[in-house]
Image (cartoon, rainbow, N blue to C red):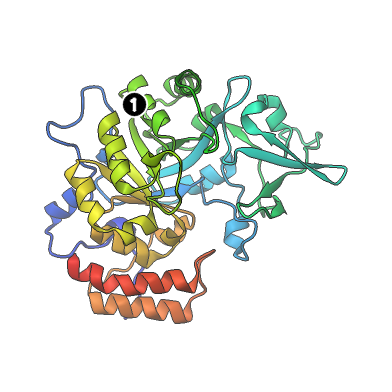
Amino acid sequence: MAVKAVHVSDVPHPNLDHQQQQLALSSPRGEGGEREGEETIGSITKFVVMGHRGSGMNMLQSPDPRMKSLKENSLLSFNAAAKLPLDFIEFDVQVTKDDCPVIFHDNFIFTQQQGVLVEKRVTDLTLQELLSYGPQKDESNVGKPLFRKTKDGRVFEWKVEQDDCFCTLEEAFNKVESPVGFNIELKFDDQLVYTKQQLTHSLDVILKVVHEHAGDRRIMFSSFQPDAAQLMRKLQQKYHVFFLTNGGSEIYTDTRRNSLEEAIHVCLEGGLQGIVSEVKAIFRNPGAIARIKEAKLSLFTYGQLNNVGEVVYMQHLMGVEGVIVDLVDEITRAISDNDSDKKVDQLRKFQRNTTLPPQFSKEELSFLLNLMPQLMVNH
C-alpha cells in the first residue's frame, strides 16, 4: 500500500461524518463553554502538532543529523518551525537570578575551564552571565564553550549545524513570527522542593512578560511541577494550563507525578484544562483516554515515539488531540489509509525498510506493533 503524504489534520477518522470529525479534533470545552475572558487553544478544530523546543530538541549523542541541525530553544529554531504547517512551538522557561525569564531546558549549564568541566545552575546566573555562554550576538565577543551532560552522565560538546544565541521570553514574543502559538513549559528542578512564595515569584515574573508582549498570540502553559501548574491557574484565568506527566515510567517522591490517574486528579483539583503525557504511558494504558475525556480534559502527548508517523496516526484514532514532536516536517504528514490490516502491514514494512528514528529501539517498535491490533479492535 502506497504512503500518501497529507497534513495530520486531514487524516480521516473512521466511521465519523465531517461534522463529527471536527468535533473529535476539537479541544473539549466542558459544559457551558469557556469562561468569559478566557482564551482557548480549542479554536483549533484539528489535530494539533507542536514543535518540541522549536524545530526539535538537540540529541548530541544521536547519530541522526536531524537532531543536531538547529540549536534547540533558539530564535533560529523557533522561526524555522513557524514556517512549517504546525500550530504551536513548545519551549522551556526558567527565571534567572536577576528575574529575567529565559528559554533554556536543562537545570545546569556546562563549560570547560582549563580542561575541567564546570557546571552552574541556570537560576543562579544573571541574564548577562547566562548569555556569556555559547554564540554571541556581538561577533567580536567570544562565548564560553558550551557542553551538555546526558542523563546517563556522558558529556558532549554542544555543537549543531546551525547555532544561535540563547534568548529571553520577551525576545521570543517580539521576534518569532506569528501566528504560531507558544506552549510555555514552566521549568523547575525535580530534585528541589519549592515554597509557594518561590513558585509565585517565578510565575509572576513570567506572567509580567506574557501580559506585556503576548498580544493576540495563542498561549498555553504546562509544567511537570504540579504545584506550579495549579498555582499558574490561580494567578491567571486567560490562558489554559496543562499538567505534564510521564505517566509512571519514572517514579517520584511526589506521588502526583506517578500515574495518569494522579494527573487527572491534579487537573480536576486545580482547575487545569488538560494533560500532556509521555506517549508510551498512553499506549500502555489506552483506557485512560476515556477517563481523561470523561473528566472534560484535553490530552496531548510527547516522547520519541511521536517521531513516527504511524504512532501519531494511532493516537489520532484513539482520541489524543495533539502531539509534541521533534521531526516536525515529517509528522505534519500522515497515512491516509485507515484499514487496520493494511496499517499494521505498513508498520512492519516500516520496521524492515526504514532507518529507525533517533533513540527509537526495535524493542519499542515491536511493542507498538504487538499493541496495534488490539488497539484497532478496541477503537
Residue at the disc numbered 1: 233
Q: Position of residue 134 (x, y in %)?
A: 72, 40
User: Is residue 101 shown above or below 64?
Assistant: above
Q: Position of residue 170 (x, y in %)?
A: 53, 26
Q: Position of residue 228 (x, y in %)?
A: 42, 29
Q: Secondary structure at mark 1?
A: helix
User: Is residue 55 shown above or below 181?
Assistant: below
- 276 vs 122, left or right, is left
* Quadrant the C terminus occupies: bottom left
Which image quadrant is residue 311 in?
bottom left
Tell me which amino acid carries mark 1: Arg
Instruction: Choose between 302 and 22: the one closer to the eye.
Output: 302
Q: Position of residue 369 (x, y in %)?
A: 35, 74
Q: Residue at x 52, y 74 (%)?
A: 355
Instruction: Choose between 360 and 174: the one closer to the eye.
Output: 360
Q: Residue at x 58, y 58 (%)?
A: 67
Q: Is residue 273 visible?
A: no
Which residue is at the far right?
114
* Quadrant the N terminus occupies: bottom left
Q: Is residue 310 visible?
A: yes
- 368 vs 77, left or right, is left
- Number of marks in the image? 1
Q: Residue at x 45, y 21 (%)?
A: 196
Query: How many C-alpha atoms fall within 10 Å of the one at disc 1: few (<14), some, or many (≥20)?
Result: many
Instruction: Choose between 366 and 58: the one closer to the eye.
Output: 366
User: Is residue 183 shown above or below 323?
Assistant: above
- 220 vs 377, left or right, is right
